[in-house]
Image (cartoon, coloured by chain):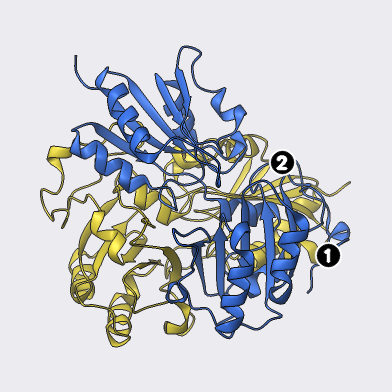
Chain colours: A blue, B yellow
Amino acid sequence: MPNGFVSLVGAGPGDADHLTLGAFKTLESAQALLYDALVSEDILALAPDKCVKICVGKRGDRLSVSQDKTNALMVRLARKGLHVVRLKGGDPSVFGRVEEERDYLDQHAIDHKTLPGVTAASAAAAQFAFPLTHRGEARSVTFLTGRTKDGSIDLKDAAVSDPGVSLVFYMSSHNAAHIQAHLLAAGRDPHTPIVIVENAGRAYANALKGRLYDLATQVAEAAFEGPVLIGIGDAFRFARVEIQTALNSPGLPRHSADTFGKAFGTMR
Amino acid sequence: MPNGFVSLVGAGPGDADHLTLGAFKTLESAQALLYDALVSEDILALAPDKCVKICVGKRGDRLSVSQDKTNALMVRLARKGLHVVRLKGGDPSVFGRVEEERDYLDQHAIDHKTLPGVTAASAAAAQFAFPLTHRGEARSVTFLTGRTKDGSIDLKDAAVSDPGVSLVFYMSSHNAAHIQAHLLAAGRDPHTPIVIVENAGRAYANALKGRLYDLATQVAEAAFEGPVLIGIGDAFRFARVEIQTALNSPGLPRHSADTFGKAFGTMR
């Protein structure tokens, strides 16, 4: 029996509206689906009924299938001649360990392709109407993970003292105090605008905005349970944030200008 | 007549397969479409026949509609009660000037929403199979523009000397020599892996890989005409690049492992 192949597919963050047409088509021909815990139900429902669906983690600190087991499972299913779809939240190339999976597939001579997805920072930015870069003011954007093996954040990773550089920390709620302390120690202005987004890309996303000096307190008080993005830099002052759930789920017009900033204000 | 509204929509980079389902649905209800020059024909074809379609720029250095005219056009069409779709290449929040457009719409009391898109770096990474971050090796990724008002690149924008930080320069072919000189002067290893991608996200994308010391020469010799991304950092050594057109357009399985690296090799 000839080997099948593996599609490493970005599901985007959250709702199916963020799925690409390419990912949608690929899902339709899936015979086995290995999906991250963060992939939403409405996306899983797009796979054929006959398709084997296996959740392989990973979500924050919760127990999940190890990367080794996921790798082995991909190969085993592909060797049965199946089209295996490895569905990953967001974009597989951004904190997605996609290279580890491709490398394993290469070693086992399994053909594969990768399809990109909308990354969580882009979804959050659209949903709460802030830019990640802004001409003349926020010249670049850096994505970092707040989750490192040893819990540390390497300040070499970012141009930390310049407010014109937008920083977005992924999966970072556990390290908010750490991030705040490091950035302040590195010379970031305590009044640097921040935005904290839970469940970016979902209709029930939440966001709040503030200033760097208050980051850890805000994260602690919010007690978010979903994945959290933290944006730090001048670009985030533009966020149209109400403390409530985002009003602009895809397909609906956003709240009009005069309803902006009721709770936290736009700080403009 | 009540005002219409404006959807600021990321078209993703290139082919329609990168369009999100949300963007697809939004396009179907467009009554006026203002699109960037980089939005592909197959995406424009998804708008209704009756929809007014206007190209508003911008592509590299070519003449295009000014941002002021684009802003005014959005408002004028929305005031006719139309659903105006402002279709932008890639993700509107990344080098898309989306905040300038939202700000103008707010000032004119026109409702709007923003839909995210796949950004070009994610598309390039998927297409040529390199990660943007890599556990333990490439801890963060920074997107920068090679096109600044005065042609300069501010080194404060990036952690330039650390090979574990992935840098991706957008629209940067004109500044390749500048980028190379600045990074070398800042202490980046001349042997830092690079990847250069033209027309990321399109079936006819091209890529080549090399080392930082040879960046300007490679860009000059390639004489790319489409938009160019330049990736610099250890993550880019993984790129599966043949000098030819990408073989893995969405929907097709990628070339098998034993065909990798024919021309430039994977440098692993």
Looking at the picture, which amino acid does disc 2 mark? Ala
Q: Position of residue B118 (x, y in %)?
A: 49, 49
Quadrant position of residue B192: bottom left
Q: Decide: is B38 above or below A9.
A: below
Q: Earlier in the sequence, mark 1 or mark 2?
A: 2
Looking at the picture, which amino acid does disc 1 mark? Phe
Letter of the chain that mark 1 sits on in the rendering: A
Residue in the image at 53% along x and 37% along y:
A19
Which residue is at the front of the view, B82 or A222? A222
Residue in the image at 44% along x and 37% along y:
B17
Q: Decide: is A166 above or below B266.
A: below
Q: Which secondary structure lies at badge 1?
A: loop
Q: Position of residue B37 (x, y in %)?
A: 48, 56
Q: Which residue is mark 1?
A: A264
The label on residue A10 is none
Q: Which residue is mark 2?
A: A203
Letter of the chain that mark 2 sits on in the rendering: A
Mark 2, residues whose alpha carbon is within 10 Å: few (<14), some, or many (≥20)? some
Mark 1, residues whose alpha carbon is within 10 Å: few (<14), some, or many (≥20)? some
Is residue B224 visible in the rendered image? The answer is no
Q: Is residue B192 left or right of residue A14?
A: left
Q: Position of residue A36 (x, y in %)?
A: 50, 36
